Image: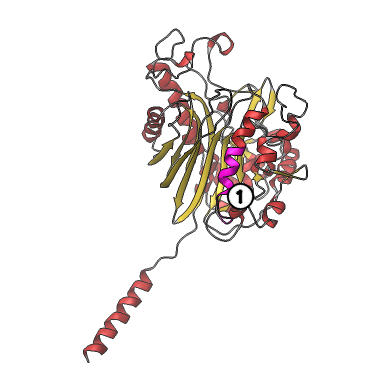
Amino acid sequence: MLKRQMKTIMVSILFVLLCCITPIEAKTFKVVSYNLENLFDLTWDGTEYPEYIPNTGYGWSKGIANIKYTNIARVLKDMGGDVIALQEVESKKALITLRNKLKDLGVDYPYFEIADSNATSVKCAALSKFPIVEKEEIQVDLVDNEIARNILKITLDIDGNRIILFINHWKSKRGPESMRITCANTLRREIDKLKEDVDFILIGDFNSNYNEYKTFRNSGRLNDTDGITGINHILKTIKDAEMVDEKALTKQTTNEYLYNLWLEVSESNRWSYLFSGRQESPDNIIVSKGLYDAKGISYSDNSFSKFQPDYLFEGKTVHRWQRAESGMGRHLGKGYSDHLPIFAYFSTEPFSFKNNDTVSDDIASLKLEKSKSPQGLIDLNSASKEELMSVDGIGPVLSARIIAGRPYKTVDDLLKVKGIGPKKLKNIRPYFVIGKK
């Protein structure tokens, strides 16, 4: 009798527990990379660039630094990333100051790391809304007493799923390609240690175009490697002299080849930096085949883009941090960074292919001639109903709802509009920008 009662009780408890279990919902999150153009603190450590030694003739003071931090925090808040890979952060003190500035704006990143074991002037860092469960600094050993910035390797826990980010800031083009080859070889060795199904992202400022093997070929100053490049040949984002596409990535059984997300946007839009007016793509997000399967973390196909609100431009140039005397003098307390941020979405859902945005971008450029902003996109806060309806997927009802929901701080705020979910947002996001308020 007692055994029967106990059995009945256990069955009842089990039934209650099963009824209370909530299915795990898929989570989509945004990964960002941003070179901040020298985010320094106000403590003299002896490793600063001369213009960032506090309280000298260059004017790097508490007031000027506060403007820089405020401006950068605005960009990061408006962009709305969940995980942010940062380059050119001087110290943990600088990183915490930026984190606190974001917290004042209502955006909290509880987890943060910086690659600060090497005494370089600036470093790679990360801010995250998800737990960083592992951190490692990977040292790059250059020759001739040259100092390289450490690669920051972090492992994130996304609802029980692990993903690795390798955050990079390779040697600048003041030096030849052989220096970046050393950075690439160091990173490649780390990749080759990973299991084949591990989800990982290479992200940051590689000081290399996505197609560097083409753009540097005729440069006698840079090409000291007989045409071999770090980003393309060593990381293997090319195969048989062609960029690796998603088909080539997913057909392989190893992690030999990797996919550069710049290929997801139209060729004319593949840039995040202007050098003497020339469009370049030093900032890259490169993904592994593990992000194209049905387990763990997956890439949200065709979600890659750059963040380019009008306030990050001054005319046709990027509104970088300003200094007098053509960038050689005092800090003027204006501007942001000389790089544009880039981003992509990832998910705990199984991977699925989407339509090719490269084609969509070209179609949009033909349809939207009259509604273009200076960067070729529709201003979400001022576009007319007709301009909104020129985007595929937006009809009379949805355009009216979008107008009623103004003003928007970021394009991602469209998720608040009834009828726009994550999938629709991914399809229409490439056409919009937030203009000046």
237 vs 279: above or below:
below
Q: Nearer the viewer, residue 109 or 415?
A: 109
Q: Is residue 122 visible?
A: yes
Quadrant location of the N terminus in the rendered image:
bottom left
What residue lies at 51% left-to-right and 43% top-to-bottom?
413
Mostly what secondary structure, the magenta segment? helix
Magenta region includes residue 281: no
Q: Nearer the viewer, residue 108 or 400?
A: 108
Q: Residues within 10 Å of mark 1 (few under 14, many from 20)?
A: many
Residue type at mark 1: give it. Answer: Ser
Q: Position of residue 136 (x, y in %)?
A: 46, 41
Q: Is residue 282 visible?
A: no
Q: Nearer the viewer, residue 139 or 289?
A: 139
* SS class, disc 1: loop
Residue 212 sits in which quadrant?
A: top right
Q: Position of residue 276 (x, y in %)?
A: 68, 19
Residue furthest to the left in view is: 2
Magenta residues span 185-197
Q: Position of residue 156 (x, y in %)?
A: 46, 48
332 vs 17: above or below:
above
What residue lies at 45% left-to-right and 34% top-to-bottom?
115
Residue 262 sits in which quadrant?
A: top right
What residue lies at 45% left-to-right and 62% top-to-bottom?
24
7 vs 48: above or below:
below
Q: Position of residue 251 (x, y in %)?
A: 70, 57
Q: Which residue is mark 1?
A: 288
Q: Nearer the viewer, residue 367 or 141?
A: 141
Residue furthest to the bottom in view is: 1
Magenta region includes residue 190: yes
